[in-house]
Amino acid sequence: MRVKAKRKEGESLTQFLKRFLNRYAKSGLALEIKDKMYRKRKMNERRKYEARIYRLKLMSFIKQKLKEGMPFEKAYELGKRYINYIKYTGRED
């Protein structure tokens, strides 16, 4: 989608440029171009698995600390700090 603008009779260059840039900003073309330039790759299976294990480790650690009486924010920070040392034992149903 291109943005078009023609210069009106008697319109100065600064007014024309301002009108064009306003139209360009409203079109959303700049955002679309940025999205295409910096697109993120889809996660592969290994990364999905690792992200899931990370979440599960963190959730189990937080649950354990909440049972011990620790506030949520502190448990969350501790869990993020020591995530490499947390063991995930599996589902706890």
Image: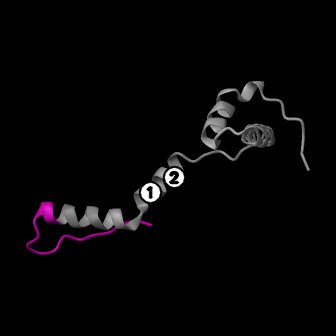
Instruction: Report the residue at 61% width, 46% height from top.
Output: 40
For mark 1, give the secondary structure: helix
Q: Of 52 and 9, which appears nearest the observer?
A: 52
Labels in figure, total? 2
- Residue 40 falls left or right of residue 13: right
Answer yes or no: do the residues labelled 2 and 1 have beta carbons within 8 Å? Answer: yes
- Residue 28 falls left or right of residue 41: left
Magenta region: 1-15
Which mark, residue 35? 2
> Which image quarter holds the N terminus?
bottom left
Q: Position of residue 43 (x, y in %)?
A: 72, 44
- Residue 61 falls left or right of residue 80: right
Question: Residue most toward the bottom?
Answer: 9
Image quarter for residue 62? top right
Q: Amino acid at mark 2?
A: Asp
Q: Of 20 and 76, which appears nearest the observer?
A: 76
- Confirm whether the magenta stretch covers residue 11: yes
- Confirm whether the magenta stretch covers residue 68: no
Q: Main secondary structure of the magenta part?
A: loop
Which residue is the site of mark 1? Answer: 31
Q: Position of residue 93 (x, y in %)?
A: 91, 50
Instruction: Report the residue at 27% width, 61% height from top.
Output: 21
Q: Residues under labels 2 and 1: Cα distance?
A: 6 Å
Q: Amino acid at mark 1?
A: Leu
Instruction: Report the residue at 74% width, 26% height from top.
Output: 84
